[in-house]
Image: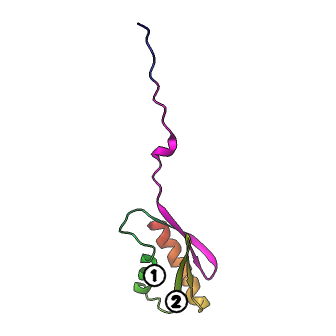
Amino acid sequence: MAFIPFFNIRDEKEDIIEHDSYDVYVNDDFVGRKVLYSESEDIGNISDYLSASGYGDFTYMEEGNKFIIEDFDEEEADRMKNQLETYLNIR
C-alpha cells in the first residue's frame, strides 16, 4: 500500500471575518472609519455619542458605506472632527 500525503490546503480568505464599516465625514472632510464589530453596534451610535458630548446642531445621513455629518458652525465642526478622530481610534 502506497502512502499518500495529506495536504491541508486552506483558503486564507476563510479566516477573515468581514465586518460592516463606514467612512465617517464631517463637512466633507474624511475623519476616519467606523467598523461595526457586533450586531448590537449601529452607525447611529456616532450621533448618539456626539449628542451626549454636547453637540446639538448637526445633521447626519447614511449614504452607502458613508456616514456624513454636517455642522454649519465651522469652529464646532473642527472640535467635532478632533473628538471623532479620537473616538474612532479607540473604538
Q: Nearer the viewer, residue 89 or 72?
A: 72
Q: Nearer the viewer, residue 1 or 86?
A: 1
Reply above or below: 23 against 18.
below
The disc, 1 or 2, on the residue closer to the chain's N-terminal end is 1
Question: Do residues under tags 1 and 2 come within 8 Å of each other at their CB atoms?
Answer: yes
Is 30 included in the stretch rendered in magenta? Answer: yes
Q: Secondary structure at mark 1?
A: helix
Q: Would you say 30 lies left or right of 38 here? A: right
Percent position (x, y) of residue 39? Answer: 37, 65
As drawn, the residue found furthest toward the right would be 28
Residues rendered magenta in the picture: 7-33
Looking at the rendered image, the quarter that the N terminus falls into is top left
Name the residue beneath numbered marker 1: 47
Q: Nearer the viewer, residue 87 or 57?
A: 57
Q: Quadrant of residue 69?
A: bottom right
Percent position (x, y) of residue 53? Answer: 42, 84
User: Which numbered circle lies on residue 60?
Assistant: none
Name the residue beneath numbered marker 2: 58
Query: Residue at (40%, 85%) from the top-left corner?
Result: 52
Query: Residue at (56%, 71%) from the top-left corner?
Result: 64
Percent position (x, y) of residue 62? Answer: 53, 77
Look at label 2 and name its amino acid. Phe
Q: Residues within 10 Å of mark 1 (few under 14, many from 20)?
A: some
Query: Residue at (39%, 69%) from the top-left corner?
Result: 41
Q: Secondary structure at mark 2?
A: loop
Percent position (x, y) of residue 76? Answer: 55, 88
The span from disc 1 to disc 2 (Cα, nearest Å) is 9 Å
Q: Residues within 10 Å of mark 2 (few under 14, many from 20)?
A: some
Is 32 included in the stretch rendered in magenta? Answer: yes
Looking at the rendered image, the quarter that the C terminus falls into is bottom left
As drawn, the residue found furthest toward the front would be 1
